[in-house]
Each structure stands twice: as C-alpha cells, then as structure tokens.
Image (cartoon, grey):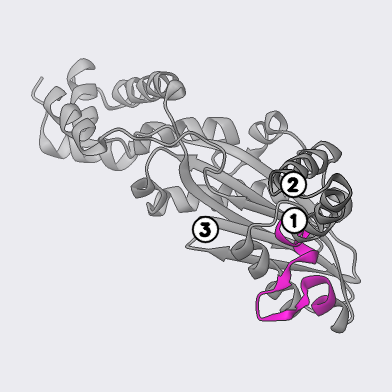
Amino acid sequence: MEITASMVKELRETSGAPMMDCKKALSECNGNMDEAMNYLREKGIAKSAKKESRIAAEGLANIFIDGNKAVILEVNSETDFVSKNEEFVNMIKVIGTSLLKSDAKTLEEANEVETENGKVKDYIISMVAKIGEKLSLRRFEIVNKRDDEVFGDYLHMGGRIAALTVLKGANAEVAKEVSMQAAAMKPLYLNINDVPEDVLENERKIQKELAMNEGKPADIAEKMVEGRIKKFYKEICLVEQPFIKDGDVSVKDYVAKNGGEVLKMVRYEVGEGMEKRNDNFAEEVMSQVKGN
C-alpha cells in the first residue's frame, strides 16, 4: 500500500512521534493507522529501555505551591536543548502538580502517582518516545507548612537551580530573599546542627593538618582550627552565611530583624553529582539521520 504524506502527517499529529518513525510504522503496518499507533507505542517503550544506560544529566527543576503544601522536583533529559522544549516543560508541570496532590514519599511511590496522562512512569515513557531522549524523574520533595509560616521559592537560570524555603514569622518577600540567597550561594545545610559529624570531623582534620604544615604548635593549631570551622559554617550553612545584600549581617540575623526564623531549605541544582555527557550530540543526530 502506498504511504502518502497526509497519512504520515496524520499519524505524526496523533502520536507526536518523529516523521521518519511514523512513515516506517505505516509501512510496517500496511497503512493501518491503529496498528501503526500500537507499533509506535511499542517502539517507544523499546527506545526507552535502550536509553536506560544513557546519561541524562540536563533538564529542569521547578517548584509548585498550593496553599500550605509545596513540591520541588528535578526532571532530567540528555541535552539542554530538550530542556527548553515546550512539551518537556509542560511535562514537568503535569508531574509536579500531580505530585502536589499526592502523599508520595519515595520515587517508587511518585512513579505510581496518577496524572492526566496516566501514571507518572507511563507518562515519562510516552514522552521518551515522543521527544527521543532518555527522561527521568530524578528527585522530589513535598513540603508542608503551617498557617503562621510562609514559603519562599526561587528559580534561577530558567530552572537550572530551584530553591524552596519555609520561614516562620516573616513575610513572603523575606522568604523570597532567603531562597535567592540559597540559590546563589550554594549552602549545603540549613544550620550548624544539620552538618553531619563525619563532615565536621573531616574538616577539622584537614584544617589541623594545614595549620601544622604552617609550622604552628599543636595547641595553637587547635585554636586556629576552631576559627576556621566557624568560617566553614559560614560557607556551608544557609543561616550562617553573610546576607548577600548586606554582608554585615548573617541570613539568620536578617530574617530575625524581620520577625522571622528559617525552618527549612531545599535546593536543587540540575545534574549536581551526576556524570555529564561529553559526546558529540551533533554527530549522534547525523548518524540517526543517515540510519533513516
């Protein structure tokens, strides 16, 4: 049966799959539109499986808030190009607003959450087939607050960095400033009490060795370590950091002056801690074109 351009166009509009895949599906199914759709769905799942070993360290983070509940999430793609795709952006919105209505605590639970397009995991598989890259929900956190508390949210670089904070006693403007601080200054922890003991001990050891290598006596080195640990706290703890708009006060003091206290911080930077792609994507695209 002859496969016409209008048939390919119809299947492409229905499935959202690439043109060449639609043409091949119709050829394999002798022009039967329903069978071609099933063929593409099956092929999409196969593509998704093949892409599991690939690196998806690009993508976007976002924050969605409804009353006293918020969710922050990161969804990954293989390339920055796809992360700017309108359909990818919309997918994050659908997943985020669906998670916001749920009580999911783990990725396993999140992938089972129902969206307007099926379960999260099935929706992602369908988008892999449509977009042609490995996509994945990497992480999320649902955060609840009380009526006397306020959310602060901030997205930087279009969603490359997302910061969500909860403050007690202050207003939304102050909370937004704190979230901007978290996004810009990369704190690892909210406050001193959150720093794990092993991290602290390792830093103490490093600083003592540095002081000893500078020729300081052991007792002097110990005193120097304590001073350097205080500086360490100012680097890694949000509330101990100098406030970015007024370096003479800490974030904790800035919030306190506005009648508040920082209770929580969640900061996501897309791809942090993940291996990055270093292949030539243009070459890969050309190889796929030649393959068709």
Magenta stretch encompasses residue 238 = yes
The label number, if any, that marks residue 4 in the structure image: none
Which amino acid is tagged 2? Answer: Gln
**Total labels drawn:** 3
Assess whether residue 236 is covered by the magenta stretch: yes
Secondary structure at numbered mark 3: loop
Q: State which mark lies toward you, 2 or 3.
A: 2
Q: Is residue 97 visible?
A: no
| Secondary element type, mark 1 | helix
Q: Is residue 268 above or below residue 26?
A: below
| Residue 17, percent from left and from top | 30, 35
* Coordinates of residue 267 in the picture (x, y in percent): 67, 54
- Left/right of residue 255 with respect to residue 269 in the rendered view: right
| CA–CA distance in space, label 1 to label 2 | 10 Å
Q: Residues within 10 Å of mark 2 (few under 14, many from 20)?
A: many
Disc 3 crowd, CA 10 A, few/some/many (<14, 14-19, 20+): many
**Cα distance in 3D space between marks 3 and 1:** 28 Å
Name the quadrant of the N terminus: top left
Q: Earlier in the sequence, mark 3 or mark 1?
A: 3
Q: Which residue is mark 1?
A: 232
Dot 3 corresponds to which residue? Answer: 159
Question: Could you tell me if residue 156 is visible in this image?
Answer: yes
- In the picture, measured across the screen, residue 280 lies left or right of residue 175, that is left
Under circle 2, the secondary element is helix
**Image coords of residue 42 (percent x, y):** 39, 19
Pick whichever, 256 or 68, lies toward us: 256
Q: Which mark is residue 207?
A: 2
165, above or below 130, in the image? below
Of badges 3 and 1, nearer the viewer stands: 1
- Please report contact status of discs 1 and 2: CB closer than 8 Å, yes or no: yes
Q: Magenta part of the protein: which range?
A: 233-255
